[in-house]
Structure formats: structure tokens, C-alpha cells
Amino acid sequence: MFLGKVIGNVWATRKYSALDSFKMMFVQPINYEHRETGEPIIAVDTVGAGPGEIIIYITASEAVIPLPVDMAPVDASIVGIVDTINK
């Protein structure tokens, strides 16, 4: 699992049918100090996150697990919204 910050959303007029009920968000990977750690990615939002929120996301084949299908072309999924980070 990784930390990220939602920096925008993606509008898609056509997408894989299993993803019709999900938003796609631009996520900036960050560390626990809120510093950027890489290039932004696109992640499927499974928890209702919005721009500006700190989130937890997963990648690779595990990204499909929160979706209601066995297989989908997904590389990253948002699985949590962070309330606080204690160092």
C-alpha cells in the first residue's frame, strides 16, 4: 500500500464496462511527510475520495481485488482515505 494525494479526476466517455460505476482519479504519490515521491498516476476510486484528500492506494494485480469483477484492466485502486498521519 502507498500514500498519495488526489490531484484531479479523469473524465472518460468510454471505458471498460466493469468500471462504469467508478471514478478515475489523478493521484500524486507522497511520503508520510507529504512530499512528492514520483510521477502522478491514474487510480480507480473505490472509496469516494475527492481532490485534495490524502489516500491509500494499491497497485499491480492486487488493484483488481476491491472491484466487483474477477479481472479488469486496472493497475491502481484507491482503497482508503487517510484522516491523520502520526510520525
Image: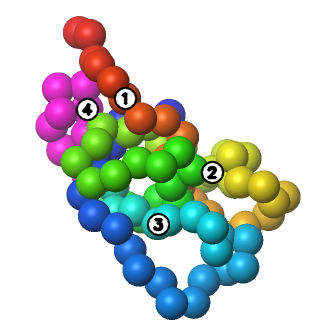
Q: With 18 as the anchor, is 26 left or right in this view?
A: left
Q: Is residue 84 visible?
A: yes
Three-letter residue code for mark 1: Val
Q: CA distance from mark 2 to mark 1?
A: 18 Å
Q: Which residue is mark 4?
A: 31
From the image, tell me which residue sits under label 1.
Answer: 82
Check if mark 4's residue and mark 1's residue have beta carbons within 8 Å. no
Marks 2 and 3: CB-CB under 8 Å?
no
Mark 2 vs 1, N-terminal side: 2
The residue positioned farthest toward the top in the image shown: 87
Spatial distance from mark 2 to mark 3, Cα to Cα? Answer: 13 Å
Q: Looking at the magenta stretch, what is its main secondary structure? A: loop
Location of mark 2 (residue): 63
Residue 39 visible: no
Residue 7 is situated, as x and y percent measured from the top left of the image, at 24, 57
Of tags 2 and 3, the one toward the viewer is 3
Identity, as a three-letter code, of the amino acid under mark 4: Asn
**N-terminal-most mark, 4 or 1:** 4
Q: Which residue is mark 3?
A: 24
Quarter of the image where one finds residue 16: bottom right
Question: Which residue type does callout 3 highlight?
Answer: Met
| Element on which disc 1 rests | loop
Q: Position of residue 65 (x, y in %)?
A: 72, 47
Looking at this view, name the residue that lies furthest to the bottom.
Answer: 13
| Residues at marks 3 and 4 touching, judged by CB atoms closer than 8 Å | no
Q: x, y percentage for residue 3?
A: 36, 36
Q: Nearer the viewer, residue 33 or 10?
A: 10
Q: To which quarter of the image does residue 9 belong?
A: bottom left
